[in-house]
Amino acid sequence: MANGVLAFPTESPALEEMYRFAFESDLVPPWWPEDQRKAYLQVFGKSTFWSLPLFSLGPPMLFHFIYQTDEFKKAVPRNELYSIPPRFRSLWNDPDISKLEFLEWQDKMSIHFYGSWFRRMFAGVQSFNSGSLLDQLLRKHRIDPSENPI
């Protein structure tokens, strides 16, 4: 399940459980093994958001709670969100956008640009190749890269 773009109904059981964990629990992640939870409490005495190891929440929390319900069945396939695989990132700024047609990205829900790669490739760039995917998206959304640098 891809977790980059999420939408939950307000009555979502998984969302309710995540809320309870965040605001009404002892903040010891129930998805941790029992021995890890005990060791953590021995060291810290109690849990706070600030004492939790980095990456304790986010995807681990989401997956723990969403797989306790049947909501995970509503997830869209990964290629709906990641419609242009990273190996084709060199085509983002190619003036021949037709090179991307075989991916059928136009019919997808979103395009993920893999932020760290995107910033590395285009830091300081103030214009993109005319006709490229990036150029077309920037024009469509009325974003001037010279006024909004990466």
Image (tube, grey):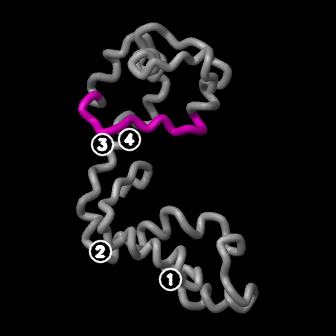
Residue 150 percent across, percent down from the top left? 62, 27
Identify the element where label 3 is drawn. Answer: helix
4 and 3 marks in contact (CB < 8 Å): yes
Instruction: Decide: is 72 above or below 83.
Output: below
User: Could you say which disc has been placed on residue 30 in the image?
Assistant: 1
Q: Which residue is mark 3?
A: 80
2 and 1 marks in contact (CB < 8 Å): no
Identify the element where label 1 is drawn. Answer: loop
- Mark 3, Cα crowd under 10 Å, few <14 / some 14-19 / many 20+, is some
Disc 3 versus disc 2: distance between alpha carbons?
22 Å
Q: Earlier in the sequence, mark 2 or mark 1?
A: 1
Magenta segment includes 150: no
Q: Which residue is mark 2?
A: 69
Disc 4 versus disc 3: distance between alpha carbons?
6 Å
Q: Which residue is mark 4?
A: 82
Q: Quadrant of the N terminus?
A: bottom left
Disc 4 versus disc 2: distance between alpha carbons?
25 Å
Disc 1 versus disc 4: distance between alpha carbons?
30 Å
Q: Earlier in the sequence, mark 3 or mark 2?
A: 2
- Mark 4, Cα crowd under 10 Å, few <14 / some 14-19 / many 20+, is some
Q: Quadrant of residue 108?
A: top left
Disc 2 versus disc 1: distance between alpha carbons?
15 Å
Amino acid marked by disc 1: Pro
Q: Residue at x 54, y 76 (%)?
A: 23
1 and 3 marks in contact (CB < 8 Å): no
Amino acid marked by disc 3: Glu
Q: Which residues are magenta?
A: 106-117
Q: Earlier in the sequence, mark 4 or mark 2?
A: 2
